[in-house]
Image (tube, helix red, strand yellow):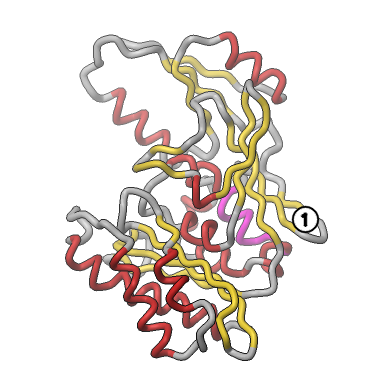
Amino acid sequence: MRGYFYESPNSFDELLAIVKDTSNEVKFLAGGSDFVPKLSFELDQIPKEGQKDLLIISLDNMDLNLITENSTEVKIGATATFSQIKENKIIEREFPVLIETINEIAGLTVRNVASIGGNIMNASPAADSIPTLIALDAVFVLNGPNGVRKVDAKDFFKGPGKTIADEVEVLTEIILKKEEGHASFKKLGRRKAETLSVVNAAAYIEKENNICKVLRVAVGSAAPTVLRCKEVEDALIGKELTQENMRIASEKVVDAISPIDDIRATAWYRKKVAPVMVRRAMEAASNAE
């Protein structure tokens, strides 16, 4: 049976020293709303042969929950909880779509604990925050023994539970650039609240004289990762933002997704509703003021 060890560093230098000195598997702990249940499940199972010991490193003392801004961008610390983000005046002013999104995530008790960074690093294809972050063209900042690097949100995810981050890299912040357009998030679940997405979608639009100038669309719970849908974007950019044009463009999402059958829905159903969710997100973003 593998051993379990816990550290709670007070600085990045201390964290990096811990990481460099260990040969164990490393997991970083923020809110723990996903990780702790998984760990509890693991402890209930028959131990696997040859597993490395697990080192859990808490980020509680790292001051990674701050939300700051300058003239061009907003930075969200990775351990900021969804409740903190929702209640923040900078987010309310600059990115109301994040509040719209958070209102669809779990319930209040979970939002008070769950961090945006944990939701990102969990890399669920059905995560609700990720389509919105991709539509907002977010940049993720990683810090590890080899230094700091920035990765576009759309390039970050490699499969269910998999990202391009190394095991010993910490997601420290999310950078959102201030833009002139509007965004919206739409979710379809099996019930009205506290449910995982059957399909979700987010859209960001900039327009001039009702002509689509910039469009970013992301869809979740319809492929191994949340997808940026260039097929939809290319079908609408340069065209008038009419309901018919948005409907035609939204149908292109079927060419991008590769859904599966699971406990929440069939692949067939997801292919039917994905265009609807994309269209609703685009219409809401187009009509926002």
Please say whether residue 20 is visible from this viewpoint. Answer: yes
Q: Is 168 on the left-hand or right-hand side of 69?
A: left
Residue found at the far right of this picture: 71
Q: Secondary structure at mark 1?
A: strand
Q: Determine the image quadrant of residue 188.
A: bottom left
Tell me where residue 61 sits by quadrant.
Answer: top right
Q: Is residue 107 visible?
A: no
Q: For mark 1, what is the residue?
A: 69
Q: Residue at x 33, y 57 (%)?
A: 221
Q: Nearer the viewer, residue 128 or 8?
A: 128
Examine the rendered structure and indicate whether residue 271 appears above or below residue 37.
below
Q: Is residue 103 magenta?
A: no
How packed mark 1 is, by other alpha carbons closer than 10 Å (few <14, some 14-19, many 20 or more), is: some
Residue 186 at x, y = what percent?
A: 43, 71
Q: Position of residue 150 (x, y in %)?
A: 63, 41
73 over 279 or under it: above or below? above
By secondary structure, the bulk of the magenta-drawn segment is best described as helix
Q: Along the horizontal axis of the image, is 2 left or right of 150?
A: left
Q: Position of residue 207 (x, y in %)?
A: 61, 82
In the rendered structure, the answer to whether residue 60 lies left or right of residue 187 reads right
Residue at the image position 76 percent from the left and 52 percent from the top: 68
Q: Amino acid at mark 1?
A: Glu
Q: Number of callouts in the render? A: 1
On screen, residue 192 above or below 210 = above
Query: Is residue 277 shown above or below 128?
Result: below
Q: Position of residue 96 (x, y in %)?
A: 62, 69
Q: Residue sitting at 53 percent across and 71 percent down?
A: 215
Q: Which residues are magenta?
A: 81-89
Report if residue 84 lies within the magenta region.
yes
Out of 276 and 27, give the one closest to the viewer. 276
Q: Quadrant of the C terminus?
A: bottom right
Q: Please report the residue visible at 63 percent of the width from the left and 48 percent of the height from the top.
A: 174
